């Protein structure tokens, strides 16, 4: 540090290349060669020191000290104005560091435990770029290495994005400053990308270096965003070469995070679609063709295909009718593939995206039917059934609703279950279609629903209006009459409702406390209303109450309340 302690004149502020000379320095001045100065020697010594290959020390404090000392030394170097003499020194030392062998941190051989050169290389790159661009890029590209994170795979595999694995071997000393080091590596790459704008060859080289040496998906995503911002900075046409680099980095991020958890994944997916849209129709079509290597089925339908078919995308790309149709066909094909792979999460999206294409819509509907037996639960099927009714397909909605009912099981005490509204809707839909449809759905309801209050609600609704009255073409000959309760199909529903009330009553009485007596009496009142709907309901209810008095005579207070209300 003493070599860089340049002393300018008092109050001069910035260091200059003309330091004042002390008496001792005047003696030393005689040993300087022509063109040399204390400043040039100090700068050269600093470059030699910073470029030496050295082992990362153990411990947090020692590692932080390495980073801090390097940054302080570079800060002092940045105070020096580069003249022709110093530029020559920079070029000489940079070339020497590239060829210096194992003693140099920028040599061809780099040990796994070596302190990375990212921060130093960024300073060299920015200093040399105006004077010797080729040398500047050689230095920066060589410094991009970070062997401590490299896997044991051959170096040739590391250039392929899907072979890059982030591994920190446990046998090595712990690198406490690794996060800071990766950030510096990312900044070096970003600096090179910015400088290489417009130069396809250099951008390709920098891209390969990033893909090979950076192992953090978050940092690659940041680089992709930086490149995209630079490429689209001007209001005029974007820089296509840099835009392609941004897209390639985005694709690599998608592959790296496809099977791993990343809290920014959704943001990454949306950004990639935006980037591909900016790159043009070919890029969008490309990511849809290879979606299975980039996205989950849910992401592909809910984000990719939906965005591609949106009006904003069509306007942005200035597509003609033929191009719009081709892009829409690709999106629909993608949606159908996703629905087949993951019908639970993608079927509804596929149906929505295929609405304007009859064949694709029929295919999506068939996928739902095929998956209904094993691959989908009642919630998903009810949702799609409601969608079908909304789209004007009541018979298809009815079909899906009946399939959903086969997966449902409501026990006696689930009177607040979230599926109750779906069951009521399914019964109302069947009732509106006609007697035959209602007759088909009632056995499913009886089998799936054991909750007395829900069954009684369904029964009451079915007796209020005539089946098929709201349908355009009723299938029932007796559509002008209310359905009788003593004949099928309502007789089966009535018997099931009465049976559910009886079973629920005994279940409640098994573990009932005095604070629930009044609530239980109200429950029996509702049960009586249902019993009385049968032609011999009064007799059945009286027998039911007498049985309760006999079986639960030990609950004297409760039975007294029962006698007061029901005799």
Image: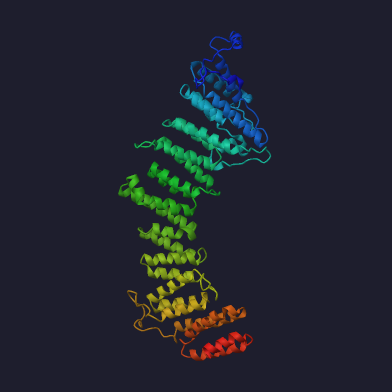
| x, y percent for residue 467 | 38, 79
Task: Residue 245: tell me if it is visible.
Answer: no
Q: Is residue 237 above or below residue 374?
A: above
Q: Is residue 381 above or below residue 204?
A: below
| Residue at 42%, 43% in the rendered image | 275
| Residue at 46%, 72% in the rendered image | 423
| Residue at 53%, 47% in the rendered image | 257
| x, y percent for residue 59 | 67, 36
Q: Nearer the viewer, residue 152 or 498?
A: 498
| x, y percent for residue 232 | 39, 38
Quarter of the rendering containing residue 361: bottom left
| Residue at 56%, 80% in the rendered image | 504
| x, y percent for residue 444 | 49, 75
Q: Is residue 88 above or below residue 138?
A: above
Give the tally of numbered discs: 0
Q: Is residue 458 above or below residue 51?
A: below
Task: Residue 8: tell me if it is visible.
Answer: yes
Q: Nearer the viewer, residue 313 or 358?
A: 313
Quadrant showing the N terminus: top right
Report the residue that reaches farthest toward the front.
Answer: 11
Structure colour scheme: rainbow
| Side of 64 relative to 455 (left or right) | right
């Amino acid at each position: 540090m003493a070599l860089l302690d340049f002393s300018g004149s008092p109050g001069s502020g910035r260091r200059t290349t003309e330091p004042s000379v002390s008496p001792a320095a005047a003696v030393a001045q005689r040993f300087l060669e022509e063109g040399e100065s204390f400043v040039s020697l100090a700068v050269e010594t600093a470059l030699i020191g910073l470029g030496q290959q050295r082992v990362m020390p153990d411990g947090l404090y020692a590692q932080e000290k390495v980073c801090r000392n390097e940054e302080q030394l570079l800060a002092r170097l940045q105070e020096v104005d580069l003249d022709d003499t110093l530029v020559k020194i920079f070029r000489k030392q940079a070339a020497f560091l590239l060829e210096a062998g194992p003693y140099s941190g920028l040599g061809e051989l780099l040990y796994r435990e070596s302190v990375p050169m990212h921060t130093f290389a960024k300073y060299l790159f920015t200093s040399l770029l105006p004077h010797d661009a080729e040398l500047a890029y050689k230095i920066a590209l060589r410094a991009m290495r970070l062997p401590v994170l490299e896997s044991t795979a051959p170096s040739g595999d590391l250039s392929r994005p899907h072979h890059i694995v982030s591994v920190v071997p446990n046998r090595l000393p712990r690198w406490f400053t690794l996060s800071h080091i990766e950030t510096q590596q990312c900044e070096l790459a970003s600096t090179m990308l910015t400088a290489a704008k417009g130069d396809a060859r250099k951008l390709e080289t920098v891209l390969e270096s990033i893909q090979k040496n950076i192992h953090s998906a978050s940092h690659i995503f940041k680089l992709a965003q930086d490149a995209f911002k630079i490429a689209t900075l001007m209001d005029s046409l974007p820089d296509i070469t840099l835009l392609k680099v941004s897209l390639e980095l985005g694709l690599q991020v998608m592959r790296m995070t496809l099977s791993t958890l990343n809290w920014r994944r959704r943001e990454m997916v949306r950004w990639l679609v935006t980037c591909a849209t900016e790159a043009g129709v070919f890029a969008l079509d490309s990511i849809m063709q290879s979606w299975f290597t980039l996205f989950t089925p849910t992401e592909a339908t809910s984000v990719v295909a939906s965005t591609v078919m949106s009006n904003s995308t069509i306007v942005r790309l200035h597509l003609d009718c033929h191009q719009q149709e081709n892009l829409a066909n690709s999106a629909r094909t993608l949606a159908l593939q996703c629905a087949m792979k993951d019908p639970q999460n993608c079927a509804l999206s596929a149906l929505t995206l295929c609405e304007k294409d009859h064949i694709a819509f029929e295919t999506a509907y068939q996928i739902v039917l095929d998956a209904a037996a094993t691959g989908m639960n009642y919630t998903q099927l009810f949702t799609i059934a409601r969608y079908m009714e909304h789209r004007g397909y009541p018979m298809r909605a009815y079909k899906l609703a009946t399939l959903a009912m086969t997966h449902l099981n409501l026990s006696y005490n689930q009177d607040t279950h979230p599926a109750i509204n779906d069951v009521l809707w399914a019964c109302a839909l069947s009732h509106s279609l006609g007697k035959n449809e209602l007759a088909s759905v009632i056995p499913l309801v009886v089998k799936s629903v054991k909750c007395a209050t829900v069954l009684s609600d369904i029964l009451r609704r079915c007796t209020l209006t005539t089946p098929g009255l709201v349908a355009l073409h009723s299938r029932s000959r007796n559509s002008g009459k209310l359905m009788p309760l003593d004949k099928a199909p309502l007789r089966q529903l009535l018997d099931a409702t009465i049976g559910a009330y009886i079973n629920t009553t005994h279940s409640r009485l098994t573990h009932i406390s005095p604070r629930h007596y009044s609530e239980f009496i109200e429950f029996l009142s509702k049960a009586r209303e249902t019993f009385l709907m049968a032609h011999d309901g009064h007799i059945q209810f009286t027998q039911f109450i007498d049985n309760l008095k006999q079986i639960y005579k030990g609950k004297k207070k409760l039975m007294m309340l029962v006698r007061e209300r029901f005799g």
